[in-house]
Image (tube, rainbow, N blue to C red):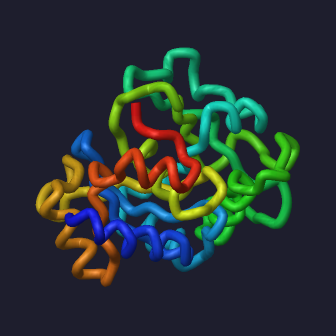
Amino acid sequence: MLIEEQDVALTAVAAGEAVVVHDAGGEGGVVFAAGRAGVANTAFAVRHSSGFLCVALPESRCDELALPPMSPRTRRESGVTVCVTVDAAVGVSTGISAADRARAARVLADPAAVAADLTRPGHLVPVAVDPDSPKPGLARAALRLVTLAGHAPAAVFAHLVSPADETRMATGEELRAFAADHGLTAFDARNLTEGDLARAGAPSPS
């Protein structure tokens, strides 16, 4: 992907659209700003992915929202921590529907939200991202892309499964094919430059 094509992906994310992100770590999936989560993009991500819908957040924000690790040993060398699942505290039914999970995502993205705005456990998976870890990964790439596009630092992401073998994740070629089939922008996160991140006020890669 050419550097100038970053503008296409960033414009799409800024407009609240979903994009397909391929990270340097070999992971890939559907990504969009949590603050722009709605029924359509949330349902799309669930339907075409593993169904394990996550929201990447800075570690500090997870602490503010009282989102503890799923277990004391969930912290990995990848620099991300899977936190206790959540639902929005109000305006939802069972929490599992696309509408309910979209609402929970918007709460996570709301800078004015507090811990009491969420119930635990729920059906949406917050993932805390360590800003000091140099390890690649879809959560980190999604968070950087959404922040660079001008949104609050909260990114919905869902890993895409290989259409040829449901026991493994999609390859880069399969990710690009999926994006083309669905009219989405395919973005290689390795093309995010430090200069681009600095201009957006996002943390530069380590």
- Where 81 sits versus 7, above or below? above
In this view, 155 is above or below 5: above
Q: In which quarter of the image is residue 183?
A: bottom left
The image shows residue 110 at horizontal and vertical percentages of: 76, 56
Picture coordinates of residue 189, whole percent (x, y) = 32, 53
**Which residue is the extreme one toward the top?**
72
Corner quadrant of residue 3: bottom left
Give the residue displayed 76% in from the left and 64% down from the top. Answer: 93
Tell me: residue 180, above or below residue 151.
below
Q: Is residue 1 left or right of residue 6?
A: left
Q: Is residue 5 left or right of residue 74?
A: left
Q: In this view, does 124 lie above or below 49?
A: above
Q: Which of 41 and 85 is in front in this view?
A: 41
Quadrant for the C terminus, please: top left
User: Residue 153, image x and y in percent?
Assistant: 62, 51
Tell me what residue is drawn at x 49 percent, y 26 percent. 132
Q: How many numbered discs, if any?
A: 0
Q: Viewed as shown, does residue 132 lie left or right of 187? A: right
54 vs 12, nearest the viewer: 12
Comparing 167 with 188, the one in front is: 188
**In the picture, which quadrant includes the N terminus?**
bottom left
Looking at the picture, how far across and down is residue 23, in whole percent? Answer: 29, 48
**Closer to us: 204 or 173:** 204
Q: Which residue is drawn at 21% across and 55% down?
A: 170
User: Residue drawn at (58%, 28%), measured in percent from left and top?
Assistant: 70
Q: In this view, does 205 lie to the left or right of 16?
A: left
